[in-house]
Image (cartoon, coloured by chain):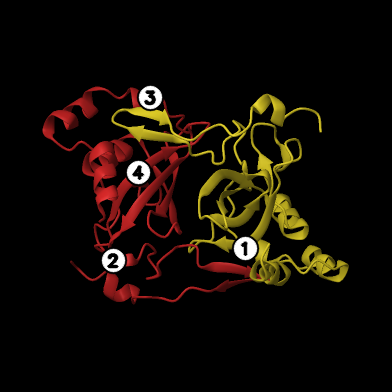
Chain colours: A yellow, B red
Amino acid sequence: MCLREAYDLVRVFPCDSVANAVYRMNDTWLNDIKWTDDGLLPVIAQDAASGDVLMFAWMNREALALTVQEGRAVYWSRSRNKLWRKGEESGHVQRVLDIRLDCDKDVLLLKIEQVGGIACHTGRRSCFFHRLEGQQWQAVEPVLKDPDTIYQVM
Amino acid sequence: MCLREAYDLVRVFPCDSVANAVYRMNDTWLNDIKWTDDGLLPVIAQDAASGDVLMFAWMNREALALTVQEGRAVYWSRSRNKLWRKGEESGHVQRVLDIRLDCDKDVLLLKIEQVGGIACHTGRRSCFFHRLEGQQWQAVEPVLKDPDTIYQVM
């Protein structure tokens, strides 16, 4: 992490206990967001260094509050219906460096550092590895690590 | 547009009439996509040159088919309940250079050239201009053009 990133991290996530308590007490910034009827928010995760879009997921209020408090991406898994600390099984944690909200306040963009360089459960750097070529989706990014070895018991 | 981008454009969008007819007839690539129950697909638009994430929107099948046929982003406006050719009023067309689908085949990433350099209806380059600083969302990107002048009758 460079000095600039460290500076940004400290500015966005003051991580002493007083600040965390304030986060819990004052949730105006969470109320500003236009959540879906299901209480969710679409989230784009982008590699802060390369600019590559790595994945897309969802958060609920708790997931976003935890993301800010912990400085790592915490999503809401719609398939498992529970909080999902990205990297909890794989170790591929996403350190959050910057949090952006769009003009309509209903979509989030995280600029992250992807630990291990792999965001996708298939073992690829990015989830967006299917490229439309002619009339077919072609997998155009290499598998960097066998998923069977990624999800061994940590 | 550089030579590489032109090459990519031709490869992804063979634009003669025969190819277009084939696109209309063979929609396997559209069937491969996991649409929502409402028949929609979340779409991320990324500036192909800078890597900046510019906006987030939705497509239905027709919007995506038209995007491929026309080589410009066509979305589905959920608020207006109709097709939305990005730039149809503002002139801020998005030329599509690359189309990616994610691992679960339910999220699209467009790499685009943003005509006019403004993607956001507020007159900013990107829609993701609110930055979380402490407990507040701060607008951190400049308005490049007054929205009142963007949406004058073309």
Camera-side residue of B79 and A63: A63
Disc 1 residue crowd, few under 14, some 14–19, many 20+, Cα 10 Å: many
Q: Amino acid at mark 4?
A: Asp
- In the picture, the disc for residue A13 is none
Q: CA distance from mark 3 to mark 1?
A: 36 Å
Between the residue at mark 4 and the residue at mark 1, the CA separation in whole angstroms equals 26 Å
Q: How many marks?
A: 4
- x then y, percent, for residue B122: 40, 69
* Circle 3 residue: B31
Q: Which residue is mark 4?
A: B98
Position above or below: A45 against B25 = below
Q: Nearer the viewer, residue A87 or A101?
A: A87
Q: Which chain hosts label 4? A: B
Q: Which residue is mark 1?
A: A98
Q: Chain of mark 1?
A: A
Name which residue type carries label 2.
Gly
Tell me the number on the disc at residue B116: 2
Report how far apart the C-alphas of labels 4 and 2 lie in the structure: 19 Å
Horizontal and vertical percent position of residue B81: 35, 46
Q: Callout 4 environment at 10 Å: few (<14), some (14 to 19), or many (20+)?
A: many
Question: Tag 3: residue type?
Answer: Asn
User: Which residue is located at x 34 percent, y 47 percent?
Assistant: B75
